[in-house]
Amino acid sequence: MNPLDAIALGLATFYLAFVITRTHGPFNVFKTIRERWPMGGLTTCMYCMCIWAAIAAWVVFQVWPPGLYVIAAAGASAGIYRYTGADHA
């Protein structure tokens, strides 16, 4: 694994954990999961979800490496969006 892969894994982990714990998702799928199966707070805690998101990102990396870079790009854009405070405008 090279450094770019490690960065991509980190960004993908952030994105997956963020969308599952903080967004409604397409067709409210993540909101429904959080409401119906809270799993002891796993689906609402970003820190708790990160380990599972990291495992999912690693599996994507093993199966289809370009897919990881797509998720990482989404993570980078979401991180920049939140860092700049654009979501509070």
Image (cartoon, grey):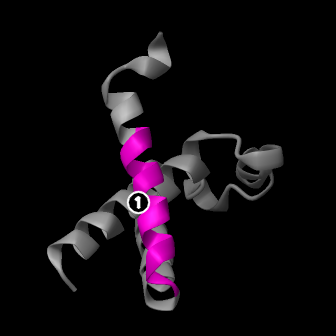
Q: Which residue matches tag 1?
A: 72
Is 69 one of the magenta-colored residues? yes
Residue closer to the observer: 56 or 67: 67
Question: Residue 62 at what x, y percent from top left?
Answer: 44, 90
Residue type highlighted by circle 1: Ala
Picture quarter with the N terminus: bottom left
Q: Is residue 44 left or right of residue 61?
A: right
Q: Is residue 80 above or below residue 53?
A: above
Question: Residue 87 at what x, y percent from top left?
Answer: 48, 21
Question: Residue 11 at what x, y percent from top left?
Answer: 35, 58
Q: Is residue 10 above or below residue 60?
A: above
Q: Is residue 42 left or right of residue 73?
A: right
Q: Is residue 86 above or below residue 81?
A: above
What residue span does the magenta drawing correspond to? 64-78
Helix, strand or loop at disc 1? helix
Q: Is residue 44 above or below residue 59?
A: above
Most distant residue in the bottom direction: 63
- Residue sitting at 65 percent across and 62 percent down? 39
Q: Is residue 77 left or right of residue 37?
A: left
Q: How many marks?
A: 1
Most distant residue in the left direction: 3
Residue closer to the observer: 18 or 51: 18
Is 13 one of the magenta-colored residues? no
- Residue sitting at 37 percent across and 19 percent down? 85
